[in-house]
Amino acid sequence: MSISKNLIALKASLPKEVTLVAVSKTKPVAAILEAYNAEQRIFGENKVQEMVCKYEELPKDIKWHMIGHLQRNKIKHMAHFVDLIHGVDHYKTLIEINKQAKKHHRIIRCLLQVKIAAEETKFGLDVSSIESILQTKALEELTNIKIVGFMAMASFTNNKAQIATEFSKLKTFFNYIKNTKKKNVVLKTLSIGMSSDYKIAIENDSTMIRVGAAIFGNRN
Ligand SMILES: *Cc1c(COP(=O)(O)O)cnc(C)c1O
């Protein structure tokens, strides 16, 4: 199947309220343009430098999402255009995003990354760290960021029951905390689900899926 056919079939299968991020990391500009010509406008990248190069080459109505782990010293390179930063897992990162966003007179939307996987290697904040960030008084002074929800990755496993349990726990936590009211916190987005597990994610209230291989084919 071609990129555009994959994309159109996938979109047709999604509930209306689920936003699709087409994960184009490692894929060439030509592949992104094919998806763009099939009306896809949101693309996800996991390396800042690669995203900046693609941003410069491609149409300016593309919304670029940073989905990878963030190095704080690289935020400045994408602060003038990034639409949503998915993987925020430190309060200090929010401070840096705010500082860089301010320079460009922007408000940058962020998702806090929640650790839900059993493995030790995954990045992310545990539930109590999320609560303490959301309760931090000084958070309201970061007027150039907006925390709009959470992002998470399930364990890397074929065990669908385990993945479902991890997403379901996150859904429960999200529903419990989503009414938190602060000037720059509006928790509406739950970014869960990739090629192998987006159906399970949607069953657990995902509002945003990040799909690469199922659109663009496997990466080398
Ligand atoms: C690569 C990546 C994806 C997409 O994975 P696929 O299996 O290609 O759909 C989603 N989220 C993150 C954070 C990624 O790094």
Image (cartoon, rainbow, N blue to C red):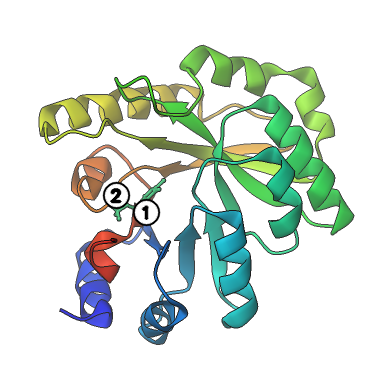
Quarter of the image for residue 52 reads bottom right
Q: Residue at x 84, y 59 (%)?
A: 104
- Identify whether 140 is placed above or below 58: above
- Is 2 situated left or right of 186 in this image? left
Q: Residue at x 83, y 43 (%)?
A: 99
- The residue carrying mark 1 has its beta carbon less than 8 Å from ligand 1: yes
Depth check, front residue: 159 or 139 = 159
Secondary structure category for the residue under label 1? strand
Whether tag 1 and tag 2 are in contact, CB under 8 A, the answer is: yes
- Identify whether 115 is placed above or below 208: above
Instruction: Please tell me which of labels 1 and 2 falls first in the chain.
Output: 2
- Is 98 situated left or right of 59 in this image? right
- The residue carrying mark 2 has its beta carbon less than 8 Å from ligand 1: yes
Q: Residue at x 71, y 38 (%)?
A: 184
Res. 60 visible in picture: no
Pointer 1: what residue?
Answer: 210
Pointer 2: what residue?
Answer: 194
- Figure quadrant of the C terminus: bottom left
Res. 209 visible in picture: yes
Q: Residue furthest front?
A: 220
Q: Amino acid type of disc 1?
A: Arg
Quarter of the image for residue 171 reads top left
- In the drawing, what numbered circle is on residue 48? none
Where's residue 181, x and y in %?
65, 29
- Identify whether 67 is placed above or below 129: below
